[in-house]
Image (cartoon, rainbow, N blue to C red):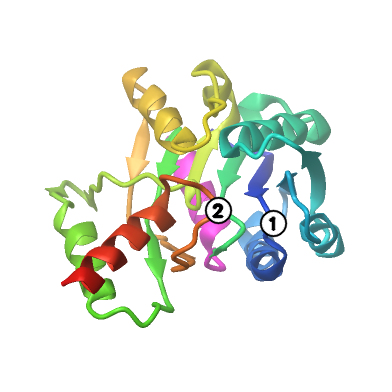
Amino acid sequence: MTPEAIAVVIPAHNEEALLSGALAAVNDAAHHPALADLQVMVVVAADACVDDTAEVAGTAGASVLNLGSQNPGKARAAAVQYALATLGTPASATWIASTDADSIVPPNWLAFQLDQARAGWEAVVGTVTVARWPPVRRLADRHHELYYASRPAGGEFWLHPHVHGANLGVAAGTYQQVGGFPALPVGEDHALVSALEQNGRRVLRTPDCPVETSSRLRPRAVGGFGDHLAQLAAEEIMH
C-alpha cells in the first residue's frame, strides 16, 4: 500500500486537561519529513463532553466532531467515517492511525506506520509505556512484570498480545472490509484487531514504536488500560 493521506482519530470525553499535549505530539508526528507529500487530517471526536475539550481541539487545529453517545467505539468509528468523507482520497490510498486523548505519540509515530504500510502490512498494533507513575508501591514493577512477561519471541519482531487504541494503525480499505470499529463502550480496539486477524489480514504486532499513555487511576473508559492499572494499584495497596 502507498498511502496518499493519513487520518488520525482521537476519541475524547472530558479531556481538556490532557488533550492539548496529545495534539501537540500528533502535530509533531504529522510534520515528520517522511510525510511531506501526504495529507494528514486529525479528527477529535468530542464525546458527551461538558468541559472545554472541543475548544481545546479546535484551537490546536484539529477537526472536531461533537457526539453525545459516551461510547469510545462509536466515537472512533464516527471519527474515521468523518475523516474518510472529508479527505476525499480513496480508501485504498488512506491510512487510519488511532490514538487517545491522554497519550503522547513519539515524533516518528506516523512515519513508522507509513513505513509498515508501504512494506505491505495492513495493520500495525503497537504497545504503550507509562512515564509518570502514581505513588503506589510496586505498581510500576508489577505492571512491567505482567506486561512484558507475556511477550514470546517470534521471528524478526517481538510479538505481543496487547491491543491499545492509543497505538493502532490500519489501512482504510481493510478497515472497511472487516466492519471497522464496533459500537462498544470498551474493547472496540480489541474487536477490530480480532476481526482483522480472523480474516487473515497482515497484522504487525510490534513494540518498536511505543506510545506514552496516562497512568491515572480514575480512567474515562471502564474496562480499559486505566482500569487495569487501578486494579493492580488496589492489589498492591491491599498487600
* Residue 40 in view here: no
Please indicate whether residue 70 sits to the left or right of residue 139 in the image: right
State the CA–CA distance, disc 2 to disc 1.
8 Å
Q: Is residue 115 above or below residue 85?
A: below
Q: Could you tell me which residue is drawn at 45 percent across and 29 percent down? A: 192
User: Mark 1 and mark 2 in contact (Cβ < 8 Å)?
Assistant: yes
Q: Position of residue 50 (x, y in %)?
A: 78, 54
Examine the structure image and report whether residue 118 is included in the region drawn in magenta.
yes
Is residue 166 or residue 140 the one in the foreground?
140
Q: Position of residue 202 (x, y in %)?
A: 37, 30
Question: Disc 2 marks which amino acid?
Answer: Arg
Q: Mark 2 = which residue?
A: 220
Is residue 14 or residue 160 the one in the foreground?
14
Q: Secondary structure at mark 1?
A: loop
Instruction: Please provide the residue range marked out in magenta.
Output: 105-120
- Indicate the quadrant where residue 173 lies: top right
Q: Position of residue 10 (x, y in %)?
A: 64, 49
Q: Could you tell me which residue is drawn at 85 percent across and 60 percent down? A: 55
Q: Position of residue 52 (x, y in %)?
A: 81, 61
Disc 2 crowd, CA 10 A, few/some/many (<14, 14-19, 20+): some
Please indicate whether residue 185 sits to the left or right of residue 83 in the image: left
Question: Disc 1 marks which amino acid?
Answer: Asn
Q: Which mark is residue 202?
A: none
Q: Mark 1 = which residue?
A: 14
* Residue 131 in view here: yes
Q: Could you tell me which residue is drawn at 54 percent across and 63 percent down? A: 105
Q: Could you tell me which residue is drawn at 36 percent across and 27 percent down? A: 194
Q: Secondary structure at mark 2?
A: loop
Examine the structure image and report whether residue 92 is included in the region drawn in magenta.
no
Q: Residue furthest front?
A: 238
Quarter holding the C terminus is bottom left
